[in-house]
Image (cartoon, rainbow, N blue to C red):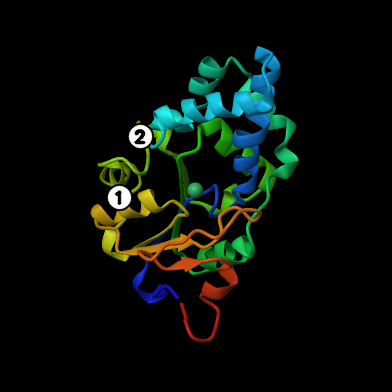
Amino acid sequence: MPPWHDIDTIMFDMDGTLLDLHFDNYFWLQLIPSNYGRLHGISEDQAREIVKAKYADVFGTLQWYCLSYWEDELQLDVRQLKHTIKHKINIRPNVEQLLEELHNLKKQVLLITNAHPFSLEIKMQHTGMGTYFHERISSHSLKLAKENPGFWESLRQRAPFDPDRSLLIDDSIPVLRQARREGIKHLLGITQPDSQGPPLECAEFSQIDDFAHILPSTPESGP
Ligand SMILES: [Mg+2]
């Protein structure tokens, strides 16, 4: 349970934290390879190998999250493909209840994502959760990925927060590690970011699966 009394700012990751990562895994690991294979006249398995190698080349950099980069690299209309499966975007359990309570407690609530601004927008439109956040920031606007050195310092210039009184909830272990290096005191991971994938083993950070377990309104916590 986060010590809500000691926390003024809560920063949420989007994919795998607020939203089921299944959408993104399905998109990048199934839909993209099958479309790439069709375009190039190769099997889906061959396409998957090629695409995975391309992913590995830029993993952990901002390009990995950049739709324009992938549209050039794969010669696919990635944005249009996202539109075709937006019905698969799902909110994780009790997210809205937690956001509502934090809003009522007048906490500063930020959405901090590596997602491209187009993906951020399509997901906010589809889920209608955009209004819960004081700011919705794509790391593209800071020209650094969240796991890159200096990201969190740079974010503080854009959206001031006190690292000692801030909580980051993020399903990415490299992102949590970088936030810890840059002094963010309260860190929480996600047990199973993809509802159809395996749990994420992590000894370094506390993890949560259902936000119902950390609601400030539950008797043992208090605001
Ligand atoms: Mg994530």
- From the viewer's side, name the closer residue of 93 and 39: 39
Q: Residues within 10 Å of mark 1 (few under 14, many from 20)?
A: some
- From the viewer's side, name the closer residue of 132 and 118: 118
SS at mark 1 in the image = helix
- From the viewer's side, name the closer residue of 144 and 195: 195
Q: Earlier in the sequence, mark 1 or mark 2?
A: 2
Residue 122, x across and y down, in percent: 63, 36
Which residue: 66% across, 20% down?
A: 37
- From the viewer's side, name the closer residue of 100 and 24: 24
Q: Is residue 223 left or right of residue 118?
A: left
> Label 2 sits on what residue type?
Leu
Question: On the image, numbered disc 1 is attached to which residue?
Answer: 178
Q: Is residue 147 left or right of residue 116?
A: left
| Label of residue 142 in the image | 2
Which residue: 75% across, 41% down?
A: 87
Which residue: 56% across, 38% down?
A: 120
Nearer the observer: mark 1 or 2; the answer is 1
Q: Residues within 10 Å of mark 2 (few under 14, many from 20)?
A: some
Q: Is mark 2 within 8 Å of ligand 1?
A: no
Residue 110, x across and y down, in percent: 45, 52
Q: Is residue 67 above or below residue 183?
A: above
Q: Mark 1 and mark 2 in contact? Answer it, CB < 8 Å.
A: no
Which quadrant is home to the N terminus? bottom left
> Label 1 sits on what residue type?
Gln
| Mark 1–mark 2 distance (CA, rounded to whole Å) | 15 Å
Residue 57, x across and y down, in percent: 41, 27
SS at mark 2 in the image = helix
Residue 72, x across and y down, in percent: 52, 15
> How many marks can you see?
2
Which residue: 58% across, 50% down?
A: 131
